[in-house]
Image: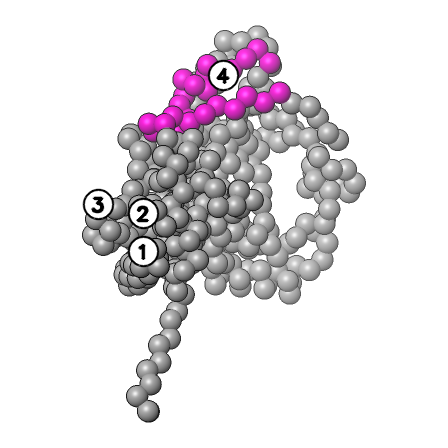
Amino acid sequence: PGGFKYFVYFRIYMDYNATTPPEPEVIQAISEALQDAWGNPSSNYIADVTFVPVSKVTARVEVEDIIAAVRPNTCLISVMLANNETGVIMPLQEICQRIKSLNKQRERLRILLHTDAAQALGKIRVDVSDLGVDYLTIVGHKFYAPRIGALYVNGPGTKTPLYPMLFGGGQERNFRPGTENTPMIAGLGKAAELVTSNLSDYESHMQRIKLYLEERLQAVFAGRIRFNSHFLGSDILPNTCNVSILGPRLQGWRVLSNCRRLLASVGAACHSDSGNRPSHILLSCGVPSEVAANAMRLSVGRETTEADVDAVVEDLRETVQLLEEMN
């Protein structure tokens, strides 16, 4: 009436590498645990650390670089399974094989192997037996579970050393004192169960949607786009697209803050204290500073659709046009 038009915009979430919504089955498991399982279920050390840089060609930590960094007093190697900004998958299985061979040759302290699998779980197959790790870190809110973590240990306290950081009660076999959060544990277990049953479908869907996203971005911003998650010889997560739209006023934070529908981030939330500076992860991978400054991490999820992608790409097109007109 009166010639007025009303538009309703629905926000589209593409920051699934930051956190994921719990699945309905997970919420149900948590609710049931809150109702039925509400009862009680049950030092500082100095370390010498060597940091191994990633290759500027593959964006991976290379096996030979890890081996070269091993010293007589090396006791632990920790490598993330998949990077949270580029999505690059590290050659962890080969690293573990090489280190285990090295362990057999040495008459000294065994080198233990740890991986942070936070970004990989729920997106690619993760099997501790195949990887060969001693420790594996699990983070629930990265694969549609609540914000709770877990640590896999291969034979805790027997085959593999594990010591408490806190002391008090005897919960969790004396490894971690404190009353267990039963509902969140139930939610984590349900989320893991869903991944075990449906990973193939999850993975193929995310891969298809991500490829469609990259195709649409390439079509709309032809000649002005750089994918910061494409590296020679490296596999990447099926859902992660790190992309820069090239231009002097198109820094990632500026573009995202002006988008009407897209909800995404320029990088990892755990590095949010870096302000608007280019990601040190991208810089270490050989991405030029002016390209890294424009980076946006778009990570699709289990429910992301092609229609969502179309809306996001159009949102980005309009935002880039607006910023360039302002310039």
Does any portion of residue 272 appear in the rendered image?
Answer: yes
Per the image, label 2 sits on a secondary structure element best described as loop
Label 1 to label 3, Cα distance in Å?
16 Å
User: Image point 48% across, 63% down: which residue?
Assistant: 24
Residue 6 in percent (x, y) is at: 35, 80
13 sits to left or right of 315:
right
- In depth, the one of 197 and 169 nearer the eye is 169
Q: Which residue is mark 1?
A: 324
Q: Amino acid at mark 1?
A: Glu
Mark 2 sits on what residue?
Answer: 247
The type of colouring in the image is one colour
Q: Quadrant of the N terminus?
A: bottom left
Quarter the C terminus occupies = bottom left
Specify whether residue 139 is in view.
no
In the rendered image, residue 179, in percent from the top left (x then y), is placed at: 72, 49
Q: Which mark is residue 314?
A: none
- Which numbered marker is on residue 223? 3
**Disc nearer the start of the sequence (1/2):** 2
CA neighbours of label 2 inside 10 A, class few (<14), some (14 to 19), many (20+): some
Magenta span includes 225: no
Alpha carbon separation for disc pair 3 and 2:
11 Å
Q: Quadrant of residue 229?
A: top left
Residue range of the region highlighted in magenta in the rendering: 48-73
Tell me what residue is drawn at x 57 percent, y 8 percent: 107
On residue 69, which mark appears?
A: 4
Quote the CA–CA distance across marks 4 and 2: 39 Å
Q: Secondary structure at mark 1?
A: helix
Tell me the mark number nearer the camera, choosing from 1 and 3: 1
